Image (cartoon, helix red, strand yellow):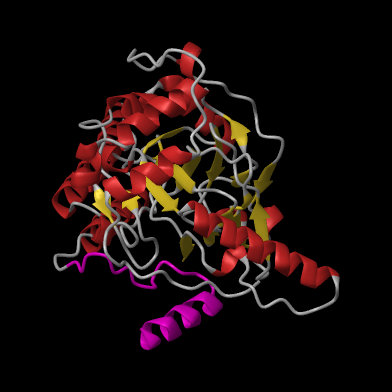
Amino acid sequence: MATADIMLPGPPLKLGVVEPLIQMKLPIFNGFLSDDDFDPKKHINFSPPTKIYTMSDLNLPDGNGVSPFAVSEPFPLFTQEAIYRMRAEIMSKEVWENCQYSSNLAKCQLRGFAPKYAPFVYDTWKNPETLAIVSRIAGIDLVTEMDFEIGHINISVKSEQQRKEELEAYTGKASSEVNGCIASSPREDEKPIVDWHTDSYPFVCVTMLSDCTNMIGGETALRTGDGNILKVRGPQMGCAVVLQGRYIEHQALRALGMAERITMVTSFRPRCPRQRDDTVLTTVRPISNISELYLQFSEYRLEILEERIRDQLKTLREMRSSGKRVDTRKLKAFLHEQENFLAHMNKEMIEDVKMGEIDNSHLLSPKNVERARKRTRVL
């Protein structure tokens, strides 16, 4: 597979420029778009994925993650009305003025808009039925990571002329390959929407908000344990993919034949406080409201610590009431684990953050690390 170019932050895209391109190819909704609250009976259209890949299927050790699960094939999740409601909220002027970010991994992202500017999106992912579906696929009981990460949006748009030129180049390349020639036109994965990375959070659910009827490409590429690439086909509008992205290098490949590609990435972590939490902030610090990110990160981590201490205190009291001796070795192991938990938490909250610049510490494979270093030197 050809190496991917890192996209520079560049000037932010403006709503007035992007909105016409986004609305250009949007199918007309057949029905009345209400402003009702999220209702699973009305807004969920779930069918199980046709295939689920495990970590073993990707030649990765099961112990790498918190579940044997790796990634699902795309599956239907939301109705057309639900998708249109989500789009209406993320396309608001308030979201684009207050929640837009850009980085060396992706040029246009919207973050931290729920619940203030997107109550429907917020209620969608907080609903117990939605959580149960994602948890069932992931093979572990999950909750949303934190409110700031409900509905991270990746956006790629192009004009009709750009769309036609890409398709012509792709058609010419395919024709050259059939005739045994070496094609000079770029592959769709040479310029990814989001470059190689691992996620900061254990699990993500990626939902497609665009009409993909004429899409070519647009897959998610995963790097397997033996260095090969597995491509999971891109979902259709209203469909989703679940990925244990903290432990698998992946990139979002560029789609051809579309005026837009808009995906919503919602992050999850294990519900049980006794499960390990490998959350890092590497790929999200430079594209976040740092104060809000650190507040929410600290809050949920301290809640986990609180629950663990309560459980340990209960165990100690039960031992005393039953006349048992304290197992000093186990108690010290518990305390050591919590020391590491707090140290990791403290390490992730860096004071001086350079907005828009994500370092290479999230990469796993030596090939991607070296390529990122070379790109940095050139830039």
**x and y percent of residue 327 in the render?**
35, 46
In the image as oriented, which residue stretches furthest toward the front? Answer: 161
User: Foreground residue, 27 or 88?
Assistant: 27
**x and y percent of residue 229 in the render?**
66, 64
User: Does residue 298 sit above or below 126 in this rendering?
Assistant: below
Left or right side of 74 for 280 = left
The answer to whether residue 141 shows anywhere in this view is yes
User: Foreground residue, 300 or 196?
Assistant: 196
Give me the residue at 21% from left, 43% from top. Answer: 296
Give me the residue at 72% from left, 67% from top. Answer: 172
Residue 324, by quadrant, is top left
The image shows a total of numbered marks equal to: 0
User: Does residue 348 sit above or below 154 in this rendering?
Assistant: below
Does residue 45 belong to the magenta stretch?
no
Give me the residue at 51% from left, 26% from top. Answer: 78
Residue 287, by quadrant, is bottom left
User: Does residue 365 sit above or below 54 in this rendering?
Assistant: below
The range drawn in magenta is: 353-379
**x and y percent of residue 201 in the render?**
40, 50
User: Foreground residue, 168 or 49?
Assistant: 168
Does residue 356 belong to the magenta stretch?
yes
User: Does residue 364 sit above or below 246 in this rendering?
Assistant: below
Residue 185, by quadrant, is bottom right
Left or right side of 57 for 80 = left
Left or right side of 360 for 15 = left
- Image quarter in which the C terminus is found: bottom left
The answer to whether residue 248 shows anywhere in this view is no
User: Foreground residue, 375 or 85?
Assistant: 85
- Image quarter in which the N terminus is found: bottom right
**x and y percent of residue 377 in the render?**
37, 88
